[in-house]
Amino acid sequence: MPLASADPTFLDALAAALPGDTIRPADARFHEEPRDRWKGAATHVALPRTTQEVATIVAQAHAARVPLVPYGGGTGLVGGQIAPEGGAAPLLVSLERMNAIRAVHPQENVLIAEAGAILLDVQNAARDADRLFPLSLASEGSARIGGLLATNAGGVNVLRYGNARDLCLGLEAVLPDGTIWNGLRRLRKDNTGYDLRNLLIGAEGTLGIITAAVLKLAPIPARTGTALLVVDSPRAALDLLALARGRLGDGISAFELMSGTGYDFLAETIPDLRQPFETAPAWSVLIEVGLPQGLDPAEALEAVFAEALEAGLVSDGLIAQSDSQRQDFWAIRERIPEANRHIGAISSHDISVPISAIPDFIPEGIARLKTIGTFRVNCFGHLGDGNLHYNVFPMPGESRADHDHNRDAIKRTIHDLVHEMEGSVSAEHGIGRLKVADLERYQDPAKLAAMRAIKAALDPRGIMNPGAVLRM
Amino acid sequence: MPLASADPTFLDALAAALPGDTIRPADARFHEEPRDRWKGAATHVALPRTTQEVATIVAQAHAARVPLVPYGGGTGLVGGQIAPEGGAAPLLVSLERMNAIRAVHPQENVLIAEAGAILLDVQNAARDADRLFPLSLASEGSARIGGLLATNAGGVNVLRYGNARDLCLGLEAVLPDGTIWNGLRRLRKDNTGYDLRNLLIGAEGTLGIITAAVLKLAPIPARTGTALLVVDSPRAALDLLALARGRLGDGISAFELMSGTGYDFLAETIPDLRQPFETAPAWSVLIEVGLPQGLDPAEALEAVFAEALEAGLVSDGLIAQSDSQRQDFWAIRERIPEANRHIGAISSHDISVPISAIPDFIPEGIARLKTIGTFRVNCFGHLGDGNLHYNVFPMPGESRADHDHNRDAIKRTIHDLVHEMEGSVSAEHGIGRLKVADLERYQDPAKLAAMRAIKAALDPRGIMNPGAVLRM
């Protein structure tokens, strides 16, 4: 049976079962997304305050076969949170009112947050308890925990602390038939049945709505240090990573690669940003370490630098001597996406390959792009995770619009190469609505069939975020 | 339709499709399990050499509706690897011939092993590449990677490195219809679809047969140190853990609690084992740290000891000054299970509770047991993970057989208490055949329903390890 639209009859009946202001017309903010690829078309949004209200919404939608699109902070980059025109009209379900920090257990290194809690608020609540919630990414001021888990968000601390999935011990969620799963376990070990938690994490709202989560905290490292080192090549950067790990082990929390193109874009579009080197280095890495008591991070980084210098891996470098210098280094890394937006990418790629394949991948990608045209490539990102943002730009004097006709060929060329190298065409951002065809093209067919079987089993009516991840 | 037995017609047809010696009568070792609770009844075992051969076996079993029981190292403690009498006769599938280390990528901190590789061999292959594979447990000399992943094994290093699931980046598996899923990704970040990997990990062979895995390695810590500290109570032990973490962060790789009863059992049953303290301490903890270059572990542990002494958390302690002393400390912890076997437990419990609930759980369990009779409790285990082995023994002069009639009441009492405290009745060992009723009693009904739906979707004929985990 086909899906039904969230029409006035359905909305009125649902509104009658909920507090007065729960169902509302969807204002403009629900129709926009950061990259302006889609325009949302949902007429209404539900704003539940409790898990029970979410269950009521899902149960009635299930009974009436009305599609639902869960909505977190609206920061997703692949359109998973957007209800576009066409097909049965869905109801948006925004978790923004469920934003409580339900509990903090410092002795257990655990925090329990509702799905609508903003990442920055969770980070601050952890810090108030003298703990670290390590998930950190550009949109942390507006991204919400439910969406971050539904998309298994990454960010800059994955090298040490893992992705969002690795920072979650338990979930509470409403399943597609409206039943509430209470899986808010604060346990480090629990081998009682299938891993439903990890199945919902990364499912992008297609298997249920996450309403709360048990999050893992970490001790705040006693001392933190940051260095910006100039390397000869991505291969030298990898050797530097191995060298640093041999000395400092898990102490390395970030290892970010930046290309000369990135520095050039910064100089061109954000001229008042202080550049740390006189000449923009072709390749450099930002290293951040968090070390236990008894170790001086600046000394430890100097020792790494000296050894790497001797091994011929680095040619220049700066070690932050103050917090403001540390912030200057990070500003270089963090403002590259802003510079990219000023320049205007023809095509952006959030990809990962096995770490040791990176030195071959970067030039091979550039070589293959030459068969299409002449472009600038700004390649930067989380080298320690094998995750690069490999973005393709027009030459100076051209605009992205001049290359609209090349976009598909560029994307296909890069994604095919990633696939050949056993990589992923969506390292951090997920599938959403943007990469459904990529998933079909590149994913292992046995896994794809298993995904379809799981979706049909848990959401037989197909009401949960239809059009995202899988075409059923 | 009911399942069919692995009868001569099926076995002959299958044998004809495989190399000559693949299907064999099952020898006695396949019918035994470590705790002697079950006697296996399978007449035959398949010993495939390749993933393709596993696929042939599963496809033919699927077509003929013949049940399969995957077999790893045979070390499971809940009967998941045993094909007991009754119902359609299953075929065992032992992965022991698929024991290759397919590749080691030191730069990526990655090793690819076949499912039949023995854990000790994987540890050694990692060490040969100057890396650490951190999974470590009592049965590491015979347990195999496939079984360790299928049961999400734990062990002594979970505090720092996580469970088996946290040490796996990718899987190759044969799904219940005989298709091969190639998910051997060496990626730290890959957000392309549902997390099939974590679904198969911990499913105990009921959703497919794992044939190979990409495993995560870690740098070998530059320096390792070990201390044995006497604490006043489990609560003081938890405060000590927080204090040590504040100083040393992730550097703590093991934090094991031991009770005076454990020391008494060791003195009674293994009298030639050197006891470190003149008087057996009522409570003590074994701490192991692995630290980066520049830190002396003995000094770091002495600083923790001094601070804890001042705070009144510890009253005595020893810090290993040599490797042989370190081994002496570990021998105390590691030989407790042996001493327990000599004494003979009435009932053993592999449980976890939220870490901060442990100080209340231990005495409350003892108090509730008094309503049943008079017993000795040896409570020990991975305090840092909230995972205790809470084992109940007869008083001196009595035997476990004297309490056969109390076993069910003891188990129920402890498990009910664990459940009240939001814990798990199977922290490490899984469900297998032993705890199917416990799962039904204690698991959240929404999760149980989702598990059944997933099982029916991926294995509609119910051929994969029937009777384990779920009663369908």
Image (cartoon, coloured by chain):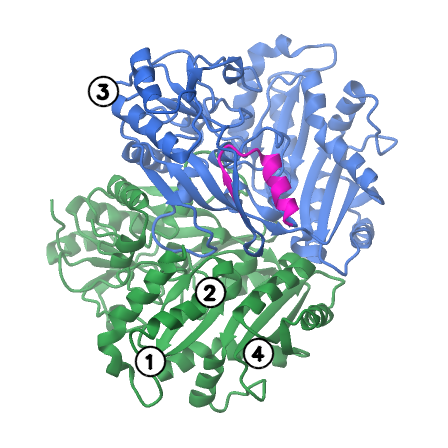
Chain colours: A green, B blue
Q: Position of residue B175 (x, y in %)?
A: 34, 35
Chain at tag 2: A
> Distance from label 4 to label 3 (Cα)?
66 Å
Q: Residues within 10 Å of mark 1 (few under 14, many from 20)?
A: few
* Quarter of the figure with residue A230: bottom right
Residue B1: give its label.
3
Q: Quadrant of the N terminus of chain B?
A: top left
Q: Secondary structure at mark 2?
A: helix
Residue B126 included in the magenta stretch of the image: yes
Q: Residues within 10 Å of mark 3 (few under 14, many from 20)?
A: few
Q: Position of residue B46 (x, y in %)?
A: 42, 22
Q: Is residue B241 left or right of residue A336?
A: right
Question: What is the three-letter code of the residue carrying label 2?
Answer: Asp
Q: Is residue B179 left or right of residue B1?
A: right
Q: Is residue A200 left or right of residue B422?
A: left
Question: What is the three-letter code of the residue carrying label 3?
Answer: Met
> Where is mark 1, residue-wise?
A374
Residue B181 included in the magenta stretch of the image: no
Of residues A454 and B170, the one drawn nearer to the viewer in this rendering: B170
Of residues B353 and A198, the one drawn nearer to the viewer in this rendering: A198
| Tag in front: 2 or 4 | 2
Q: Residues within 10 Å of mark 2 (few under 14, many from 20)?
A: few
Mark positioned earlier in the residue sequence (2 or 4): 4
Q: Secondary structure at mark 1?
A: loop
Residue lying at 36% horizontally and 83% vertically, measured from the top left? A343
Residue A360: give its label.
2
> Where is mark 4, residue-wise?
A329
Of residues A275 and A373, the one drawn nearer to the viewer in this rendering: A373
Q: Secondary structure at mark 4?
A: helix
